[in-house]
Amino acid sequence: MSEKVPMTPEGQARLREELERLKKIELPQVVKDISVARDHGDLSENAEYHAAKERQGLIVARISFIEQTLSRAEVIDPSKLSGSKIQFGARVKLVNVDTDEEVVYQIVGPEEADIKQNRISVSSPLARGLIGREVGEEVRVVMPAGPRTYEILEITYA
């Protein structure tokens, strides 16, 4: 029995789009590149051929990974959630108690986490520290860069 992978509908859609792009565009292109490189002769010293074969392996591995992830996806729509406690899918507004810096994060599945988009994995130290907490609580989290203390300002589900 495989473990379920929590995912938002947007995360599922992004993975499906990536899978389609890999299967319909990138894989056929790399197969053409291999064919062209093969036509150049001696494969033992053909850098184009070896690079294309390596890229093909990476694409095939990524396709397999995405298919496995989607097959285990447990899609959770944050817009259908509510409550005063933080759970998967929540957007959480925090203030760093030491610096007064405010930040908003959405707690998402591991495959859709993207710190540049303020989406953190449900399995990250910060998200684990926030799950089950409420507005007004302070949360002390040990992060890779050292301990941080946040106060929870707002919880929304969109």
Image (tube, rainbow, N blue to C red):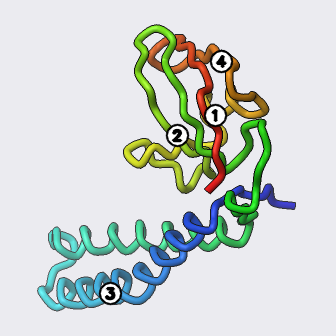
Reading the chain from its start, which is encountered first: label 1 or label 2?
A: 2
Q: Quadrant of residue 2?
A: bottom right
Q: Quadrant of residue 75?
A: bottom right
Towards the viewer: 6 or 25: 6
Q: What numbered label is drawn on residue 139?
A: 4
Q: Position of residue 67 (x, y in %)?
A: 62, 73
Residue at the image point whose x is 65% and y is 65% from the top: 69
Q: Is residue 70 visible?
A: yes
Residue at the image point whose x is 16% and y is 68% from the top: 47
Q: Position of residue 62 (x, y in %)?
A: 49, 67
Question: Looking at numbered disc 2 in the image, what kind of residue is underneath it?
Answer: Tyr
Question: Looking at numbered disc 4 in the image, what kind of residue is underneath it?
Answer: Val
Question: Looking at numbered disc 1 in the image, what kind of residue is underneath it?
Answer: Ala
Q: What numbered label is drawn on residue 105?
A: 2
Mark 4, residues whose alpha carbon is within 10 Å: few (<14), some, or many (≥20)?
some
Mark 1 — residue?
A: 127
- CB under 8 Å between callouts 1 and 2? yes
Q: How many marks?
A: 4
Question: Looking at numbered disc 3 in the image, what kind of residue is underneath it?
Answer: Val
Q: Secondary structure at mark 3?
A: helix
As drawn, which residue projects farthest toward the top? 98
For marks 1 and 3, give the CA distance.
41 Å
Q: Which of the two marks, 3 or 4, is nearer to us in this view?
A: 4
Reading the chain from its start, which is encountered first: label 2 or label 4?
A: 2
Q: Secondary structure at mark 4?
A: strand
Reading the chain from its start, which is encountered first: label 1 or label 3?
A: 3
Reading the chain from its start, which is encountered first: label 1 or label 4?
A: 1
For marks 1 and 2, give the CA distance.
9 Å
Mark 3 — residue?
A: 31
